[in-house]
Image (cartoon, grey):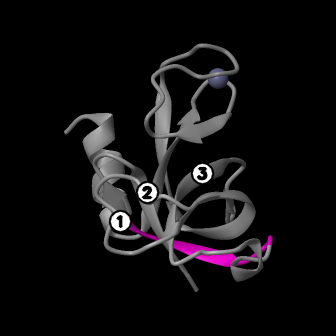
């Protein structure tokens, strides 16, 4: 399986796959090919619980293609528990900023081919 497939497979189990650089220990998402810090391509795979706290989000009042069934969506950036990076994903049912206070807990529920990680509130 390629890296993208591995990442999607992990997301379907509610996990986030990451790469830790063997050279400098910098951790990034599984989907990167070279370390952003030192350009090494030798990684150790790490798996995180796909759970974290909302850092920021943007409400999409017009649902993206493929999400027309569920009304408003938020494009959410969240800090992954125990990981040194943020991840973004889609959370449905968010109509106003008050629906999702910063710091809310979200969980990865799966992956959409077009839009990326799918989230739910926990
Ligand atoms: Zn590195």
| Span highlighted in magenta in the image | 102-109
| Residue annotated with mark 3 | 87
> Around disc 1, counting alpha carbons within 10 Å, would you say few (fewer than 14), some (14 to 19), or many (20 or more)?
many
Q: Position of 15 compared to 53: left or right? A: left
> Around disc 2, counting alpha carbons within 10 Å, would you say few (fewer than 14), some (14 to 19), or many (20 or more)?
many
- Of helix, strand and loop, which one carries label 2? strand
At which x and y percent is residue 8?
31, 52
**Quadrant containing ligand 1:** top right
| Residue annotated with mark 2 | 117
- Of helix, strand and loop, which one carries label 1? strand
Is 122 one of the magenta-colored residues? Answer: no
Quadrant that contains the N terminus: top left
Q: How far apart are marks 2 and 3 (CA)?
A: 9 Å
Q: Is residue 117 above or below residue 51?
A: above
Residue 99's disc number: none
> Around disc 3, counting alpha carbons within 10 Å, would you say few (fewer than 14), some (14 to 19), or many (20 or more)?
some
- Of helix, strand and loop, which one carries label 3? strand
Q: Which residue is drawn at 67% across and 15% down?
A: 38
Q: How far apart are marks 2 and 1 (CA)?
A: 6 Å
| Residue annotated with mark 1 | 110
Q: Evaluate if marks 2 and 3 touch, with contact meaning CB atoms under 8 Å apart.
A: yes
Q: Which residue is drawn at 64% across and 22% down?
A: 36
Dot placed on the residue nearer the N-terminal end, 2 or 3: 3
Q: Evaluate if marks 2 and 1 touch, with contact meaning CB atoms under 8 Å apart.
A: yes
Dot placed on the residue nearer the N-terminal end, 2 or 1: 1
Q: Which of 111 and 51 is in front in this view?
A: 111
């Amino acid at each position: 399986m390629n890296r993208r497939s591995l990442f999607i497979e992990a997301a379907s189990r509610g996990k986030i796959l990451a790469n830790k650089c063997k050279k400098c220990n910098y951790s990034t998402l599984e989907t990167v090919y070279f370390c952003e810090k030192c350009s090494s391509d030798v990684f150790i795979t790490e798996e995180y619980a796909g759970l974290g706290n909302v850092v920021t989000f943007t409400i999409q009042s017009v649902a993206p293609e493929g999400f027309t069934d569920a009304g408003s969506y938020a494009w959410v950036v969240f800090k992954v528990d125990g990981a040194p990076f943020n991840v973004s994903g889609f959370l449905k049912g968010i109509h106003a900023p008050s629906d999702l206070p910063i710091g809310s807990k979200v969980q990865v529920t799966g992956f959409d081919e077009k839009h990326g990680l799918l989230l739910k509130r926990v």
